[in-house]
């Protein structure tokens, strides 16, 4: 009896491998990161523990761009600008992002209340100071009856003189002098003139506070006008060998980011009780370091002699002062028409 042949069953073809797809842009993945958009491939939903562990790792990792950038910014003048134009960019924070973050931190720290030199007594108005002087005069009339009245009178007069010299009152008097020019009605009925009149009608202390707040608020915007103007003056100084305008601009961006970071650290230390009272030598050292740092950054990046770099350093200092006066004037005009 012949055996029934057993049919040969071929094994099914294995399923085709499905390529991994980037969940952000849909491009095929060839590794952990997308070659098209750079996003990391993380298909599963993370737990809260995993989320915080990843955030901590990104901040504390030895190769973190943040810490490397800040270290080079503080200790290696001109290094970040040189690295950028050499094409070594992935290991550092982008220049303008770095500048924006540090300038924001600086203005936030600069706006914190001073906890070291706190004036507990409020600044008195001109009427209150005049009242102190009148009270002193009345006390002096009682000298015959009360011998100790002369001491009290002198104390009141000293207090009146001290309050009169207070910076807040001096600023208020300056604003009052300016506002005196806008008391008359404008025959042309200009809208901007009316806006200035409305501002001058506020109480003196409120006017001074509003100007200070507006100045701090608009200074970051003014820097976006200041830096390009200053970069243009640097291009005039460094015309041989020929360099691109953006080179000067980026060096200024990095230098100003360094200045803002150094001053933010000092201002933050000043606002720490006890510590802020003993920073005199440190503050002086920081300012000396800032002056040296900018000179060294110019020398490192442009690779010119010390004498030529120093001459251009002085010229740029003059341009810095002139440009800052111009930008401050424009900012003041802007504030005057927007308050």
Image: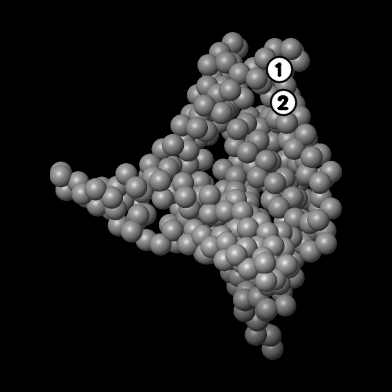
User: Residue placed farthest to the front in the image?
Assistant: 144
| Foreground pick, 309 / 112 | 112
Q: Quadrant of the N terminus?
A: bottom right
| Foreground pick, 324 / 296 | 324
| Foreground pick, 134 / 167 | 134
| Picture residue at 60% right of the left edge, 41% below the top | 95
Question: Which of the 4 image quadrants contains residue 181?
Answer: top left
Return the residue at label 1: 310
Q: Position of residue 58 (x, y in %)?
A: 72, 60
Mark 2 residue crowding within 10 angstroms, few (<14) / some (14–19) / many (20+): some
Return the residue at label 2: 295
Mark 1 residue crowding within 10 angstroms, few (<14) / some (14–19) / many (20+): some
| Picture residue at 71% right of the left edge, 17% below the top | 310
Query: In the visual, does 60 lie left or right of 198?
Result: right
Q: Position of residue 260 (x, y in %)?
A: 65, 45
| Picture residue at 70% right of the left edge, 46% below the top | 263
Question: Which of the 4 image quadrants contains residue 53?
Answer: bottom right
Q: How many marks?
A: 2
Q: Is residue 102 among the parts visible in the rendering?
A: yes
| Picture residue at 65% right of the left edge, 81% below the top | 6
Above or below, 219 against 296 in this view is below
Q: Position of residue 20 (x, y in %)?
A: 58, 62
Q: Position of residue 34 (x, y in %)?
A: 59, 54
Measured Cα–Cα span from mark 2 to mark 1:
7 Å
- Element class at badge 2: helix
Q: Is residue 61 among the parts visible in the rendering?
A: no
Query: Which of pointers 2 and 1 lies earlier in the amino acid sequence?
Result: 2
- Element class at badge 1: helix
Above or below, 157 against 100 in this view is below
Task: Tell whether label 1 touches label 2 (CB within 8 Å).
Answer: yes
């Amino acid at each position: 009896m012949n055996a029934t042949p057993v049919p040969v069953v071929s094994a099914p073809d294995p399923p085709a491998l499905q390529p991994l797809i980037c969940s952000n842009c849909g491009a095929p993945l060839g590794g952990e990161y997308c070659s098209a958009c750079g996003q990391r491939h993380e298909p599963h939903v993370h737990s809260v523990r995993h989320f915080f562990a990843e955030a901590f790792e990104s901040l504390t990792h030895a190769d973190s761009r943040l810490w490397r950038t800040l270290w080079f910014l503080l200790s290696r003048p001109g290094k970040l600008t040189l690295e950028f134009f050499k094409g070594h960019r992935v290991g550092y924070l982008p220049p303008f992002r770095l500048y924006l973050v540090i300038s924001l931190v600086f203005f936030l720290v600069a706006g914190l209340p001073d906890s070291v030199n706190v004036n507990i007594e409020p600044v008195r108005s001109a009427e209150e100071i005049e009242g102190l002087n009148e009270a002193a005069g009345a006390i002096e009339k009682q000298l015959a009856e009360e011998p100790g009245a002369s001491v009290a009178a002198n104390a009141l007069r000293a207090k009146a003189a001290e309050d009169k010299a207070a910076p807040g009152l001096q600023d208020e008097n300056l604003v009052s002098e300016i506002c005196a020019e806008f008391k008359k009605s404008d025959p042309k009925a200009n809208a901007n003139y009316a806006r200035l009149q409305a501002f001058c009608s506020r109480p003196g202390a409120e006017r001074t506070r509003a100007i200070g707040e507006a100045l701090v608020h608009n200074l970051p915007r003014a820097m976006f006008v200041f830096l390009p103007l200053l970069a243009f003056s640097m291009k005039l100084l460094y015309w041989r060998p020929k360099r691109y305008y953006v080179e000067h601009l980026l060096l200024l961006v990095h230098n100003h980011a360094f200045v803002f970071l150094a001053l933010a650290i000092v201002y933050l230390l000043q606002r720490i009780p006890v510590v802020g009272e003993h920073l005199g030598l440190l503050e002086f050292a920081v300012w000396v370091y800032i002056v040296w740092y900018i000179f060294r950054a110019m020398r490192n990046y442009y690779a010119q002699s010390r004498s030529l770099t120093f001459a251009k350093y002085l010229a740029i200092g003059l341009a810095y002062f002139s440009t800052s006066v111009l930008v401050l004037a424009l900012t003041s005009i802007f504030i005057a028409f927007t308050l």
